Amino acid sequence: MKRSLLSLLVILTPFFTFAQETAEKGLDQKIDEGFKPISDFFSNVIFFQIFGTPFVLILLVLSALFFTIYFGFPNIRYFGKAINVVRGKYDDVEGHSLGDPDAAVDGDIRDTIRDESKEGEVSHFQALATAVSGTVGNGNIAGVALAIALGGPGATFWMIICGFLGMSTKFVECTLGVQYRDVGEDGTVYGGPMYYLSKGLKDKGFKVFGKVAAVLFAIFCIGGSFGGGNAAQSNQATVVLKELLDLQSTGAGFWIGIILAILVGIIIIGGIKRIASVTEKVVPFMAVMYIIACLYIIFSNFSFVDDAIGLIISEAFNPKAVGVGGVIGVLLVGFKRAAFSNEAGAGSASIAHSAVKTKYSASEGLVALLEPFIDTVVICTMTALVIIIFNSGGAFQYGGDGSGAVLIDGVSYEGAGITSMAFAQYIPYSNIFLTIAVVLFAVSTMISWSYYGLQSWKFLFGRGKGADLVYKLLFLTFIVIGAAASMNSIWAFSDAMIFAMVFPNMIGLFFLFPVVKKQLARYFDAIKASQK
């Protein structure tokens, strides 16, 4: 532990020196001005349009729809079974003989290979908690507020649809993550799209193409870890902390970033086992507390719920938000925020799920389909209902000025600030509660994404300690950048990095989805055999 703290101190020393020299010179503004051109460049490249619609969103939605139909609506049919896997109902299957050798892939049959159930580092529940902590974050608080501020209540409807379809995509990519993972000599697991792209496409006869796609994904995933999994989180944590503490000084965001960097740095040095041990305790607690608070507000205003639901449905097809761009505009706002929140199709969660202790890759795929449901269908919808109920009296105008900021009582609010105002209307001292929730969501997301980014970094630069230290230095740097820069710049960069991962990841999914079908049959055969 002492060596970890010493390493962290060495990493952060340049920040303290830099801060002393520039804290009184508009530091936050300088960081934002330097970061904005980078953010704008990546956003323009990734979100290129076809027929006025970003192609990446078309790719995500149509792919999710295809997987939903091809696998026979797994988001509905296997929902109960997924819960049972997390509960451990089928744990005895790991030691049971398989029924149909033809259902295996590459001769992957019990008694012919090593016992894969002993491989992996975390349980089904821990893997789910780690992955959920990477998706359940400020996208659920700030992202939903941004979607409604821009697109009105109708954006919620399209968020739910995107989350529902995303369950199927998550099932496919996380099954592949376990199927093609690497296990080091010390038992450490290395998995994710980098491995199923390189190994899976090699099996299909596309070795070079697979390697190139894997490298591209790793690069984008590192960018995603710096953006959506890091800077966007510290940005929103800083917003609520500055509001709660009434911090107006020019360097406040920078110093909050430094504190967050120290906290996250202490945790991430421990690796996936420490991350899992933290997230399996923190994530369920904070998610349950947040849901309880939302439910309290919703049931306290139960007479408005039907009106809110009516607005969500009607304005999905007849939006009244100013400047949203009609039905297509509100649909895009909803899909974009939902995809950012649950990351289905980006492939990131498969990195965490690949560390699970199992020899049946489809078992973890089933667990993974719960993520978009928890993240988007449940938590995002609850946040949306709270904000819509709050605005039933016309507290702000949907659409605002088109930037995502809205005026409430003459004061401009954005992201988590809007959600905070909605909570404050109904729960005394809720600003303290929501600040704690936002910070915990932010920290849990950052520590999970540090693992995703580090796995990608290892894929590109090797598994040495020196390479790890370089990545962690860069990761901590972006915590500070996110805390200091503006919301618009950070979220534009974050969106671009997360959605960039979709392109190479989808290549792997469309080449390898037949493998998923075989592995699913293999797992179900094992369950049937164990029940005889």
Image: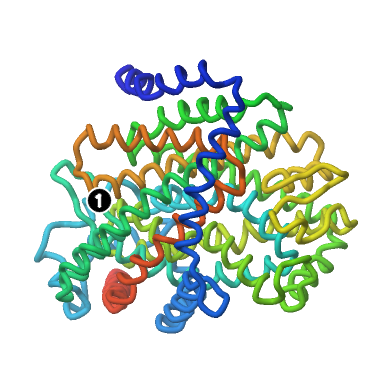
Question: Residue visible at 33% across and 18% down?
Answer: 6
Q: Is residue 84 visible?
A: no
Q: Where does label 1 land, which residue?
A: 190
> Secondary structure under badge 1?
strand
Q: Is residue 319 visible?
A: yes
Image coordinates of residue 91 in percent, x first then y, are 33, 58
Image coordinates of residue 98 in percent, x first then y, are 21, 72
Q: Residue furthest right?
A: 393
Q: Specify the color scheme.
A: rainbow
Q: Quarter of the image for the N terminus: give it.
A: top left
Q: Is residue 417 left or right of residue 19?
A: right
Image coordinates of residue 228 in percent, x first then y, are 49, 49
* Towards the viewer: 209 or 62: 209
305 is higher (above) or lower (below) than 280: below
Q: Residue furthest left?
A: 112
Image coordinates of residue 233 in percent, x first then y, are 54, 43
Amino acid bearing label 1? Tyr
339 is higher (above) or lower (below) than 36: below
Question: Residue visible at 19% across and 44% down?
Answer: 462
